Image: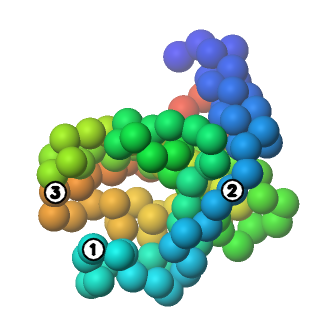
Amino acid sequence: MNPAFNHEFWSALDALISTHAWVIDRPAGSSHPRFPDIVYPYDYGYLEGTTSADGGGVDLWVGSEVPKSLTGVVMTVDLFKKDTELKLLIGCTLEEMQRIEVHHNGASQSGVLIVRDDDGPMSR
């Protein structure tokens, strides 16, 4: 993999994150509006003014690390919604990222964690 392309990918996401407001519509501990058994372990929301595959904003998770910089992404496939999405992980520790990955695996959804490393991919 070309490290320059990898750096450009993360830099492009940094630019997207820094130029759009974060909307947290599902705070940590809250339940999914249609599926009350799904509880969000961390703050979950989207980037205002962006568009994702499902027509909503680009999704993001916010962890406990400061500063709140992009630490990874989770790529998901949802067979129920018939879409794929990129979930941004902002300020997440490795443990938080792994818990988010587990959150996105089950039922009709499958996800894979990619930890940020500007020198090369660190897919789990």
Residue at mark 3: 108
Q: Is residue 50 left or right of residue 87?
A: right
Q: Is residue 92 left or right of residue 122?
A: right
Disc 2 residue type (three-letter): Trp
- Work out whether 59 lies above or below 100: above
Cα separation between marks 3 and 2: 27 Å
Q: Position of residue 81 (x, y in %)?
A: 21, 48
Cα separation between marks 3 and 1: 15 Å
- Work out whether 66 lies above or below 38: above
Q: Reading the chain from its start, which is encountered first: label 3 or label 1?
A: 1
Q: Position of residue 37 (x, y in %)?
A: 27, 84
Query: What's the residue at 51%, 51% (across, down)?
Result: 59
Disc 3 residue type (three-letter): Ser
- Work out whether 18 lies above or below 8: below
Cα separation between marks 1 and 2: 22 Å
Query: What's the residue at 69%, 56% (across, down)?
Result: 22
Secondary structure of residue under mark 3? loop
